[in-house]
Each structure stands twice: as C-alpha cells, then as structure tokens.
Image (spheres, helix red, strand yellow):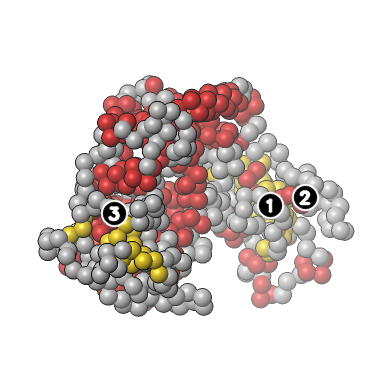
Amino acid sequence: MAATGGVSGKDSSSVVEWTQPPKEKVYRGSEHLNSYEAEWDMVNTVPFKKKQYTNGDAPSHRNGKSKWSFLFSLTDLKSIKQNKEGMGWSYLVFCLKDDVVLPALHFHQGDSKLLIDSLEKYVVLCESPHDKRTLLVNCQNKSLSQSFENLLDEPAYGLIQKIKKDPYTATMVGFSKVTNYIFDSLRGSDPSTHQRPPSEMADFLSDAIPGLKINQQEEPGFEVITRIDLGERPVVQRREPVSLEEWTNNIDSEGRILNVDNMKQMIFRGGLSHALRKQAWKFLLGYFPWDSTKEERTQLQKQKTDEYFRMKLQWKSVSEEQEKRNSRLRDYRSLIEKDVNRTDRTNKFYEGQDNPGLILLHDILMTYCMYDFDLGYVQGMSDLLSPLLYVMENEVDAFWCFASYMDQMHQNFEEQMQGMKTQLIQLSTLLRLLDSGFCSYLESQDSGYLYFCFRWLLIRFKREFSFLDILRLWEVMWTELPCKNFHLLLCCAILESEKQQIMEKHYGFNEILKHINELSMKIDVEDVLCKAEAISLQMVKCKELPQAVCEILGLQDSEVATPDSDTGEDENIGMPSCATSTFQSDSLRVLATSGARDDGPTQISVSPDVSRLTLA
C-alpha cells in the first residue's frame, strides 16, 4: 500500500493523514522506481478542529477512499516501529500516546527513509535504547519549551537542528563553546562550497525564525535609513537610589503616592534602595494602582490572595492518574522542575536543594500555568520570576507581580516568536542609525541579524548581570522612561562598548558569538544605564530622526515645546519633528562630552505639569 499524507509544522493541532492513492496513480513509470517519491506524497494540511475523529479513529470509508485510511495528530505520536532488516519490503507502525497502534504502513517499492526524514522536520526522533527498530518521538514543533542542554554534547548537525527547531533554547546557553564546526556543518565537506555567499547565515537564521528580515534587501513600505548626523552626545550622571524617607515623604495621609511622575524620574535616575523595593515594585509592575489608597490596596491583596490559592488548588488537586491523561500539564510540570533545579544558587535565598525558595518558585510557576493555560510554562520564565520572589518574600505578591511582568513579556514566549522578531528588527534599525559602519562590519561577518542579542531580549538581560544588578536594571526599565523600548538602547550601549574590540581584532561569526556570550557578569550596570540614557537624549535632540526610529522610541506625532529665549516664557508650537519623549529632566545634569556643562543654544525645557522632555 502506498501512502499519502499531510503534515504541518505551523501549529500543534495539525494532523497527519494517510490515504491510499487512486488506482490509476499506483503505477509509476520506470524513471520513478528508484525514487522515494514513488512511495508517498505530501498533499495537504488538515486542521484538527474540523475533524470529528482523532487518534486513528477515522471512518472506514470516506469519499470512496480506502477503508485502511487513518489520521492522527503529530502531538499524539509516541513512537514509530520499523521493519526488521532483510524482511522484504519496508513498513512503519505508528504508536500513539494512548497506546493505540495503527495499521502498518507498507512501502512496496523501496525504503521509508524519506518519510522519516520529513517527519523529523516537525518532531525529534531518537532510537530507543531497548529496541533499535523503534524510534521514540519528542514532539517539538518549534516549541519554546525545551530544557537547557549543553550544545557540545551533540554533533554539529544536532546544534544546527536545535537552532532551527528551537532558537530560544539554543541561544540561552552554549554560545561560548561554539566553534568552526557550525560553518563546517553548514558548508558540508564539498570544498567548492567553502566560500560562503554573504547572505548565507542571514538566510539560515531567517529559516530558523520565519518572518525575520534584518538588513536584507529593501522591501516596499520600509523606510531606508541613511547616515544622519545625530549631533553631540550628552553625558549624564546618575543619582543615589531613592531612599525610604524620600518615598515616605511622597505619600499622603491616605496612602496615595504624590507626584507619580517625579517619583518615576527619581527611580529612573537612581533606582531604589533595597528596603523600598518590596513596596515600590508592586506599583512599577502595575499590581498596585499608583493612585490607590492604603485601604484599597489592602482589599486588593485580600482579593488576589483568594484568587491565587483557588488557582493553586486546581493543580494541587490533580491526581497522578489525571495528570497522566493531561500531557500539557505533565509537560509543564516536567519543564518547571528542570528549570527550578537550575536556578542560580549564588543568592542565599535559593541555596540548597530543598530550599523553601525553590519550592515556592515551583508552586508559583505551576499556578501561572492555571492562570494562562494557553501559554503555560516556557523556558526562561523562571529567570523572570526568581528576582521577584526574592524581593517580595511572599508567594502571593510574587505571583501577581510576575503575572504583571508576563503581561509585558508574553510575546517573547509565544510560539510564533512575533515579539522577538519585532525587537530584533527594531534593534537593527537603531544600531544602523547610531553606527552604520559597525552594522556593515557585522553584516560582513554574517552577524547583521544580531542573533547574539537574542538572550538579552528574551529574558531582559537576566543572565548578563549579577543578581543584585538585575534588580537595579529592571526597576529602571519598569519606569518606562525616558522613552519606549529603552531596553533596545541598552543593547545598543553594550554593543557600542564592544565595537572597538570586535572590529580591531577582526572577529568573525564564531568569535562574535563567543565574545558576546562571555560578557555575562562583566557588564557595569550603571555605566550601561548612563550610555543608554545619553543615546536617548542624543536621538531626541536630532531634528532629522527617521520616522521608523521615532515609532520605535514612541516619539512620533508629538509637539515640541520651544522656550522663548528673549522673554523666558515657553511657547508651544506644532512641529513635524518627532523628537519628543516622555521624560522630564528638571534636575538631570546634562554635560557635554568634554565634561563641561553645555551652555550652548540647545537647552532642555520642562513642562511643569507633564513628564516630558522637549527641545529648544
């Protein structure tokens, strides 16, 4: 029996359908006798929801087709058993997770290897340690939820497959160990292919992240950014962290925060003293409304406590037998346990195998799976939670702060990776404006796609800074000052600092990956914050900022307040420029790059009632 089928890697609900071809198509000409195409064809994708039957339970006759037809979802596939060698024609037997064994699929005119190779585009197959004829299935489907693995524990082909199947996990660890075998695996052994086309790596990663187009050919509707003089970059200085006394002095008798804009500005410029974080983070993350009273917050906490423990009870009450029948919940639990065990133990809060902090991490993440079951748990989420739990020291508060943070970050973890695609493209746009020469060099080394920044963006630099430094960095970013997507300017600041070494030492693709990965725990958080803020001020001053950059930084469609230098009075005039941001700088010291105060004609004026940085 020949086979035809449909396979889709686009969503996890796709199914495989095998049907006997019409009799008139069974015969193939002699030119096809040695081709695997004679054995089966990929014909269509069948949406799971449109079918009344699953797990092999297909009707015996459908539209006159063979009664031996069967259909199943790739997510239900457990294993594939192959025929014994020398036993005549080859066959495959599909076994599903509910132990349903489908009829053998025979290949009368040749091997079944092409079918196996095609299935490996959507699932990972590995030989059973107990039976070489059996291939065990680990359904990946470009999922985000793989465990961390050492990239050097497998051959080069395995690494490339990892990046293609799961770019999230592949970039989380191991870049420091990447060697020339990456290129060797891409080039193959044919010497004629050793000269790579300039766009080869960009094409490769475009395949790994569908829809990612960075520094490729110009497309209609995209703005071409040419070299622009951004002017002199100011040098900024940061202040001391906001103290508990400063915070308390900005609270009224009913517990409301006074002058929220000013408080956010102080936090942006200096961060928070650690004793204040437990209170302030709840506001910064949106768990507490800024204008709420103390009584309103108390009532909110009671409500959220009840809601949390109701969700926690849902998964706590699931029996082992029930969990065996719920593959998603079982997979979530397995991933969470693996990631929690890998939590950074350098912080005493998470020391020890049975540390209460680790147990709470596990429980909060499992409860989040009940809160957002569609997203569930994805690799990297534990990195976002651990600092929150450390600061809150309370299970319920940590959960709701985490849920709020995930509202901001969820696109990073969605299967289609739209959030990551967008950020990489935006980062490329900003970096090209700041330093087109550096961008050109990266492109010449097959690195123009900035894939080495993937981990930075995915978990907001969590693995690049020390535990205490990441607390400072996150609270500054949560103020949403001085502009939209400030984290992209932080990336630019780090890359700019490394530009000289990368270019002077003529780093290639592998060396760039290795160098960027080895920056982890070596970056000065205060220095990066200063540079990123200076870049934002430099861009705001530029009157020819491209519209694409304005949109990335949230500067479009704004008015520029221009003070009258003769009268000293401010006069608002509408201008087509987009150089406006939501950052007030009433007490910020802006210095020229020489270190002297900038007393030139360009001044920074402050609107008294709105948090806004504008230009003269």
Indicate the secondary structure of the residue bearing disc 3. Answer: loop
Q: Are marks 1 and 2 in contact (CB under 8 Å)?
A: yes
Give the label on residue 502, or none. Answer: none
Q: Residue at x 33, y 67 (%)?
A: 562
Q: How packed is label 2: few (under 14 Cα within 10 Å), some, or many (20 or more)?
A: few
> Please, what is the three-letter code of the amino acid marked with disc 3?
Ser
Which residue is pictured at 65% across the width and 67% down the height? 37
Residue 610 is situated, as x and y percent measured from the top left of the image, at 39, 53
Pointer 3: what residue?
A: 585
Mark closest to the chain's N terminus, 3 or 2 = 2
Q: Is residue 452 visible?
A: no
Instruction: Classify residue 32 as left or right of residue 521.
Output: right
Q: Which quarter of the figure is the C terminus placed in?
A: bottom left
Which residue occupies the foreground of this view, 489 or 380?
Answer: 489
Q: Quadrant of residue 582?
A: bottom left
With respect to residue 172, does 437 lie above or below? below
Residue that appears at 25% across and 70% down: 566
Going by the numbered disc 1, the residue's amino acid type is Val
Using the image, tell me which numbered label, if any, was put on residue 15: 1
The spot of residue 26 in percent (x, y) is 77, 66
Using the rendered view, name the quadrant where residue 514 is placed. Answer: bottom left
> Which of the image's four quarters has the N terminus?
bottom right
Secondary structure beneath disc 2? loop
Q: Hey, which residue is sitting farthest front in the picture?
A: 567
- Measured from the top left, where is residue 43 in percent x and y? 70, 64
